[in-house]
Image (cartoon, rainbow, N blue to C red):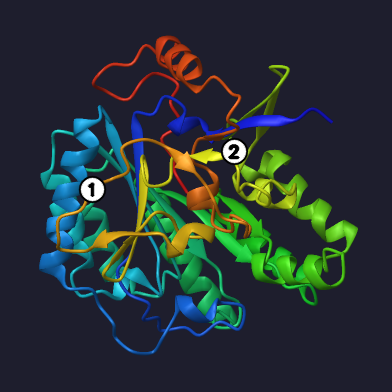
Amino acid sequence: MSKVVYSSSRNYMGHRVANVYIQPNRYCNYECSYCWPGAHTKVKDFVDAEKLYKTIDDLCKQFNDRDVRRINWGWSGGEATFHPNFLDFQKRILSNDYLYHTFNMTTNVSHNLSWWKKFVKVTEGYFSRTIAASLHQEFVNTPAKVRKFKEKCKYLSNNNCSVVVNQVMDIDIFDDQLETMIEITEDIGIHGRPKVNSTLLKEYRKYTGTDGYNSYQMKTMNDYYKDQKSKLQQARIYQQTQEGEEINFLDAEQLKLNDFWENLKDWICTAGYLSVAINGLEIKRGVGACRFQIMGTVGEDFSLDDKPKLCGEAKPCSCTADLKLPKWKEEFNINTFVEKTRDEAKFSKTPWKGEVVRDN
């Protein structure tokens, strides 16, 4: 097999799109058995709004200064929508109107429909909005709750939001979960995403040398992206081998299924340069393995990395927010590649023709 020397979401290949991942609270009204312990709490630990306003403005300025044209703002939790200033944060972002902005969020969609109507109105200034609606069947566990979940997803889809239903797949009830997800997505006309339980997969591989999931389950998760029912229009992940061969994946989740999330320690990555993660009051280089690389504090002055740097982390790159970013081996000629990408895309002040603007 040829050696892969470059990998990126197609959105980021020209280094003119930045990504900001924000976890404004770990508070969540759900408590899923498979959720990482550090990702949720019943304590209302909301980040100070005024401090985050300053950091939002600082990031817009710093990215603009390095010729970024568009920032994708990704929200997660906890359940980020329960932050009392969540909608105010969107207004603040959109006030920096010298840049284009896109929005994506992972949410359990548990707010009532009236709240989502406010959300649609407040966020209409984004160039695109993507909602990863997490179907947590431990809580959405009755026909009535499934109907409400479906109703809100349909409303968002009908109001210019791209909606994908996320389902973390459990080994023991895999088929039942898949059936419910397909029922919801096919009825609305949106696509679903059966997601591997990253923690479970890592543990099984570490201690047993197996995937835990059987071959049928692994194949089902991988092939689901290729199924025309998934409504995916084009490959989102681009890779290149040392011989110049192209490899394409429809979704960043497939990188985990195909083992491109380990042994990236000696790869150069744009985390910290074209992307940051905000977790509470900490500004970090990334979300997964590089989450311990602290860059600054929310509400205080800080600087992005002045150039892409070596990953330096031996642990798996477990979050797609980091995994989808441009990264390459040292021998790869990144400058020539970026120039060629920009030239082919014919960049202008507006998002370019053919650009995939959905980030998730």
Q: Position of residue 156 (x, y in %)?
A: 38, 55
**Of pointers 2 and 1, the one earlier in the residue sequence:** 2
Query: Viewer-nearest of labels 2 and 1?
Result: 1
In this orientation, which residue lies closer to the viewer: 296 or 78? 296
Q: Residue at x 59, y 38 (%)?
A: 232
Left/right placement of residue 301 relative to residue 207 reads left
Nearest the camera: 28 or 311? 311
Quadrant into which the N terminus falls: top right
| x 63%, y 57%: residue | 316
Per the image, label 2 sits on a secondary structure element best described as: loop
Q: CA distance from mark 2 to mark 1?
A: 37 Å
Q: Is residue 307 left or right of residue 63?
A: right
Q: Residues within 10 Å of mark 1 (few under 14, many from 20)?
A: few
Who's the residue at 10% across and 67% down the image?
50
Report the amino acid beneath label 2. Answer: Leu
In this figure, which residue is indicated by the disc labeled 2?
Answer: 232
Q: Residue at 49% across / 50% down in the picture?
A: 322
- On screen, 233 above or below 198? above
Q: Residue furthest bottom?
A: 42
227 or 291, nearer to the observer? 291
Q: Position of residue 172 (x, y in %)?
A: 80, 77
- Asked if residue 180 lies left or right of residue 294, the reply is right
Label 1 belongs to which residue? Answer: 303
Residue 70 placement (x, y as % from top left): 29, 34
Can you tell which quarter of the image residue 81 is in?
Answer: bottom left
Q: How many marks?
A: 2
Does 54 sit above or below residue 251? below
Q: Is residue 166 left or right of residue 20?
A: right
Please determine whether, in this image, residue 251 is positioned above or below residue 209. above
